[in-house]
Image: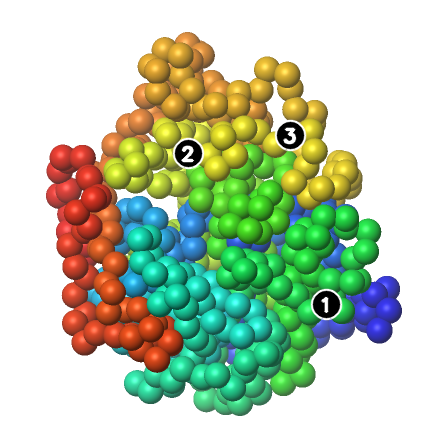
Amino acid sequence: MHFQTKFLLLSNFFCLYFSITGSTKSKPNIVFMLADDYGWNDVGFHGSTQVKTPTLDNMAKEGVILNNYYLQQLCSPSRAALLTGRYPIRTGMQYFLIEAGQRLGVPLNFKFMPEYLNELGYESHMVGKWHLGMFNKNYTPTYRGFKTFLGYYNGYTDYFDHRTREPPEGMDPNEWWGLDWNFNEGENLTSINSDFGKYGTHVMQNRANDVIKGHDFNSKPLFLYLPFQNVHSGNDVDPIQVPIEVEMQHPNIWNTLRRKYVGVVQELDNAVRNITETLSNVGVLNNTIIIFSTDNGGAPNGFENNMGSNFPLRSGKGYYFEGGIRGSAFVFGPMFKNRAGNVSTDLMHVTDWLPTLYEAAGGSVSDLGDVDGHSMWSVLTGVNKTCPRTEVLVNINPIKNSKAIRVGKYKYLLNPYDVMDAEAPGELPDTFDVVEPNNTPAQIWCGKIPANVDTKCHSESTGQDECIFDIENDPCEYYNLVDNPDYKSVKAMLLDRLDYWDYKSVQPLVPPYDPEGSPAKLGFVFKPWTDNATIPNNRNDIEIPVESYPNEVK
């Protein structure tokens, strides 16, 4: 079908949807779509003209775009924050991400979102990427609240053969290659090879549709968690994978990796459309909350063999600059009709989803205990115009002595370790195309990069790699205010808030690699390998400064 025809049909579909005013049930269905490493500038509603995302753009236009929305800088910490409602410093996930062969997961004393929603009468299913622990079965999805799970445990896998190659440092790569594709139901954990050769996004889309079609919506509401494979790179031998016929639809993109990446985004947009249409076809779209979010910033310029774009935001995945932690997101559904079409600048963090959705499902947020998230439900629905969140803790990593926080409009960073040498975006955007300001309401535009832009995030007065930015007026982080005497009190305030959160931190969890987790010892399959659910002590080569950790992981 011609692209323009598909676009017009899609627009008519959403117009028809919002003309439906039928009654809805008290508990809404919840579908959470999580993209992986999705760049800020890789979606139309942020102003991209190179990447075509008609589904996401239409849903965002009819919903609420979250333009001041933050996540963690990496996969595992973000997913842990999403499902627990707690900052990674509270769960021990603040150092890095969970790697293959580590006896590591989010500690079992933390309840996950599906466990809370199940107590409110929901049935929870998951399709996609886990990346929250699998060395012991108790850390896997169906032991943490999901009835079924189709997907993979590790941080990435091949889009077609569903094998993962992730050798720990110093270990034989040939022993750390194996199948990572699973269908779990209850206590039955099954590695499956029947999807060999099938594009992962298509398999996930079809499974999501089967869950929706097979669910009894008259007896209980559905929570469907869809952490997509897109647009993370696959294995290093063939990192960006898309069906050739999709890639060839973008002949004007001369950079091969960028062209393939845009195709992977197209497949993501198609899957979102297909799943949303299934919700409509079974008659439940008018009682469904849909959230679309990335898990962190995009991986640009070949980082991790990928080609995302966060332009004009600074840096990308893995770092504390805006390009690594400020994410593309929106909410969609009739519940948001009072704010439909809004571009929200309310400050929001990924930890807010648990209390927000728990309240939307009829629960009392006080039942969640000591979470770091705030319920944004009344704000998102337009009932309350006062945002409850005034600050975002980006992270505190004592091993690298790096930390960052945003309070109000000001942001402080120490040792941000920028993958791009801490430089602001260059004259040539990371899209390998011309990017210009346009009339897109949610686009961020900072103008021409100034000659005196700070590129090193360094303080001459302290000798430390630290910076302060006014994010409201300088979202591209061009001007470091850390040595400006007019901001001395601002720095003191930001450091005081970091001290508060530092006191609430627990020790990072960094256990050693376990050779028994090698796929070569498990039939060349990644799967739980030990009955011991205890997370071991940290590696000997990890040095944590002698500090007081008054809190245990609890």
Check disc 2 and give the amino acid type.
Answer: Tyr
- Residue 482 vs residue 506: left or right? right
- Residue 465 vs residue 2: left or right? left
- SS assignment at label 1: helix
- SS assignment at label 2: loop
At 31% across and 69% down in the image, what residue appears? 518
- Residue 338 in view in this figure: no
| Nearest to the observer: residue 440 or residue 390 | 440
- Residue 6 in view in this figure: yes
Q: Position of residue 508 (x, y in %)?
A: 24, 48
Check disc 3 and give the amino acid type.
Answer: Gly
| Nearest to the observer: residue 46 or residue 305 | 305
- Residue 164 vs residue 247: left or right? left
Q: Which mark is residue 554?
A: none
Q: Position of residue 32 (x, y in %)?
A: 51, 66
Vertically, is 186 above or below 342? below
Q: Earlier in the sequence, mark 3 or mark 1?
A: 1
Check disc 1 and give the amino acid type.
Answer: Ile
- Residue 273 vs residue 379: left or right? right
Residue at image mark 2 = 417
Q: Which mark is residue 426?
A: 3
| Nearest to the observer: residue 303 or residue 182 | 303
Callout 2 touching callout 1 (CB < 8 Å): no
| Nearest to the observer: residue 498 or residue 332 | 498
Q: How packed is label 2: few (under 14 Cα within 10 Å), some, or many (20 or more)?
A: some
Q: Quadrant of residue 172?
A: bottom left
Q: Mark 3 to mark 1: distance in Å?
A: 31 Å
Vertically, is 489 above or below 133? above
Residue at image mark 1 = 244
